[in-house]
């Protein structure tokens, strides 16, 4: 038969529609009848007679019938499908709801396309049906009467496939997974002879079939363009499902991003805002279509929305609609339509991440502080009080007593434990860089400054705790800025004009006498009073000798594990040495000394012979008779050779100090040495002047 090629449809549609009708032997099938021009009653009578003979078993194959239809008839007969009557297979409500839920995306995507398809074929009596891969009617729309089972439009929940209805367009489409049309008497069941139908598969992104779209209308009104519309609609549903999936993936990614995303159109109206941005800008209403001023106002220098320009990691200060200040890093990139896509990251959150990566985290808590002495108990009690609030705390103590350990324990015991913990050694920063290190600087603030500026330690600690170690070494210029942070909770970067609000808990520490520093003018008195809100005095090791044994065993166990050596403890004499030593370097010195000792010791117990000389000579020396140093009758000074023999003996030092009742000047004069020399020897031998002075 001849087919009109001037359908007006795209070429790919004509090719698909007419694929079965372009076979060389097509005239052997339906003769001169044309789908384009309609099929008359002679055609239907011819097809119907062949089908009747097939049902009676007179033939099993006919070359007059299209191959796809013939295959479907054969499968239908093998399945025992009735050739007359009204077939009926219907799901119950519970089963149908489960299937609808599973195919919700397919139904939501197909519904508007099915509505548009129906508009294009009205006013004909027709029905459009969406099914899943099992032939379940998911959604149906249509006009007119007499569709199939005597209803206005086939009901949702019905099942149509070859094993139920025999040869229909949707059943054949699901079986052979290709676009098909079934015309009038080509249906296996004569109940459908008054209708012609077309169906096309709907596929996912991998090409797998997920359902079918079919159109049923009056037999003689079927046209090849109708077939093309069904194919085009099925393809549109397929593409829309792909696009919908991509959009859902993009939306998921946007919601998982750790930054706010804002998209503006060319007129500056907000087109998109993700969940993080809503939380960052305190948005609780619909702001799409409105200007940025509806959610925030830029307060700092520079432009925020600069259409047509691409920027990266710029700083910006804003004030939200509810008055809350906000400091962010933002990047922006133009969109093809002339709009702008902006991403923002809150500075506090970025600083927290930076602190975590660079080690700005407290690792010790109160369980790591060892000591049961009365002096240590008082310091721990005050430290626990400090952890229960956010007041400024000043920790005093000699070098090596564990001031930072206390600071970390206070932070980890507070409500800020999950926030940054930033450590600053005020004595280790060059004096001309203290301001920029602590409070940050703006771009171009000084030679060598970062082009984009940099935050200071206080900004990095925002929301958490900053530990200012050796606060007594801070220069006066920085003390003024620190006082403002403590009093007002805001800072200004070096070279900047815009103040930044920060929420930082300050814990300071020093080994210096701050009262004396205030008196001599090297430390501001107002800053001292502002820091001295809660004072914790960490005792030196010589004032907590009862803790030495516990600390020594703790350090030895840790060091032994590191060195993979079996060291079980100390001999009584060695422990006596450790407890008698003055420990000028405190706990840090004890740990370092034990590490050196463990390396050379043969074990299993540490003996006196394993200890360094400065520690071993602190053992109580048996009291020896006091022998005065011979002096020259003429000068009154010790005679030659006496200094090395007398002053070098630890026992001689002890006796001279006892005789002088701990008076170093008198003892040095008696031994014939300077006070500096005697102090050096006292420290080297680990003698405790306070203990000697207390002896009767």
Image (cartoon, helix red, strand yellow):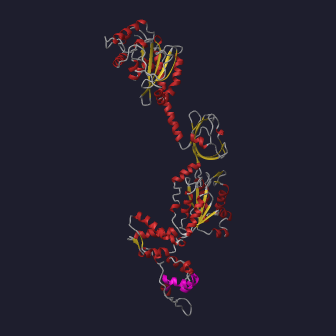
Q: Report the residue that reaches farthest toward the bottom.
A: 633
- The image quadrant where one finds the C terminus is bottom right
> Is 274 above or below relative to 5?
below
Residue 132 in view in this figure: yes
> Is 93 above or below relative to 310?
above
Can you tell which quarter of the image residue 521 is in?
bottom right
Q: Is residue 108 magenta?
A: no
Considering the whole magenta stretch, tell me its main secondary structure.
Answer: helix
182 on left or right of 277: left
Can you tell which quarter of the image residue 274 is in?
top right
Q: Which residues are magenta?
A: 646-671
Residue 562's x, y, as percent? 41, 63
Closer to the camera in the image, 311 or 456: 456
Closer to the camera in the image, 148 or 661: 148
Residue 690's x, y, as percent? 56, 77
Residue appearing at x 54%, y 40% in the figure:
255
Q: Report the residue that reaches farthest toward the top.
A: 42
612 on left or right of 262: left
């Amino acid at each position: 038969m001849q087919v009109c090629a001037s359908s007006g449809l795209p070429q790919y549609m004509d090719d698909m529609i007419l694929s079965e009708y372009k076979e060389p032997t097509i005239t052997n099938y339906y003769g001169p009848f044309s789908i384009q021009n309609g099929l008359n009653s002679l055609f239907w009578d011819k097809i119907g007679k062949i089908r009747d003979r097939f049902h009676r078993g007179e033939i099993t194959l006919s070359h007059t019938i299209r191959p796809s239809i013939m295959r479907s008839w054969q499968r239908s007969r093998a399945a025992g499908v009735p050739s007359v009557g009204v077939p009926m297979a219907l799901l119950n409500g519970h089963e149908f709801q489960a299937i609808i839920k599973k195919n919700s995306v397919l139904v939501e995507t197909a519904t508007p396309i099915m509505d548009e398809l129906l508009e294009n074929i009205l006013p004909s009596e027709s029905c459009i049906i969406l099914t899943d891969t099992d032939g379940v009617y998911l959604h149906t729309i249509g006009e007119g009467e007499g569709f199939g089972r005597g209803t206005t439009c086939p009901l949702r929940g019905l099942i149509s496939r070859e094993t139920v209805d025999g040869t229909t367009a949707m059943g054949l489409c699901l079986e052979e997974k290709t676009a098909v049309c079934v015309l009038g008497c080509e249906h296996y069941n004569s109940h459908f002879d008054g209708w012609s139908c077309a169906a096309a598969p709907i596929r996912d992104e991998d090409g797998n079939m997920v359902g079918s779209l079919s159109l049923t209308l009056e037999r003689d009104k079927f046209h090849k363009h109708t077939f093309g519309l069904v194919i085009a609609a099925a393809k549109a549903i397929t593409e829309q499902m792909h696009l919908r999936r991509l959009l859902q993936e993009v939306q998921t990614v946007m919601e998982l991003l750790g930054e706010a995303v804002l998209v503006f159109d060319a007129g500056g109206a907000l087109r998109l805002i993700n969940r993080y941005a809503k939380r960052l800008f305190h948005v609780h209403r619909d702001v799409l279509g409105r200007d940025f001023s509806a959610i925030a106002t830029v307060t700092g220098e520079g432009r925020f929305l600069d259409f047509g320009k691409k920027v990266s990691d710029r700083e910006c200060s804003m004030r939200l609609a509810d008055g809350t200040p906000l400091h962010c890093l933002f990047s922006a990139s133009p969109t093809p339509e002339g709009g702008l896509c902006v991403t923002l990251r809150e500075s506090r959150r970025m600083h927290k991440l930076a602190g975590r990566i660079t080690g700005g985290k407290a690792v010790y808590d109160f369980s790591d502080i060892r000591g049961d002495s009365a002096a240590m108990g008082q310091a721990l009690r005050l430290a626990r009080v400090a952890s229960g609030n956010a007041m400024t705390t000043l920790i005093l103590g000699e070098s090596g007593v564990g001031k930072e350990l206390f600071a970390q324990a206070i932070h980890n015991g507070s409500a800020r434990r999950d926030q940054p913990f930033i450590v600053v050694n005020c004595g280790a920063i060059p004096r001309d860089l203290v301001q920029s290190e602590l409070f940050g600087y703006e771009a171009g603030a000084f030679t060598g400054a970062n082009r984009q500026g940099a935050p200071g330690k206080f900004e990095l600690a925002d929301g958490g705790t900053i530990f200012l170690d050796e606060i007594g070494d801070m220069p006066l210029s920085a003390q003024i800025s620190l006082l403002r942070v403590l009093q007002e909770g805001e800072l200004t970067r070096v070279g900047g004009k815009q103040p930044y609000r920060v929420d930082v808990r300050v814990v300071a520490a020093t080994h210096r006498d701050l009262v004396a520093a205030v008196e001599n003018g090297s430390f501001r008195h107002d800053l001292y009073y502002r820091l001295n809100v809660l004072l914790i005095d960490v005792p030196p090791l010589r004032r907590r000798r009862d803790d030495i044994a516990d600390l020594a065993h703790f350090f030895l166990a840790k060091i032994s594990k590191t060195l993979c050596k079996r060291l079980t403890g100390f001999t009584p004499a060695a422990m006596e040495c450790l407890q008698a030593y003055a420990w000028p370097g405190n706990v840090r010195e004890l740990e370092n000394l034990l590490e050196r000792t463990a390396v050379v010791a043969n074990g299993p117990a540490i003996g006196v012979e394993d200890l360094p000389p400065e520690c071993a000579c602190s053992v109580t020396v048996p009291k020896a008779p006091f022998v005065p140093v011979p002096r020259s009758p003429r000068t009154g000074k010790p005679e030659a050779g006496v200094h090395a023999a007398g002053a070098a003996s630890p026992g001689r030092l002890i006796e001279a100090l006892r005789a002088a009742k701990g008076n170093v000047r008198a003892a040095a004069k008696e031994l014939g040495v300077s006070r500096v020399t005697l102090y050096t020897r006292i420290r080297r031998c680990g003698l405790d002047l306070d203990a000697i002075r207390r002896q009767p």
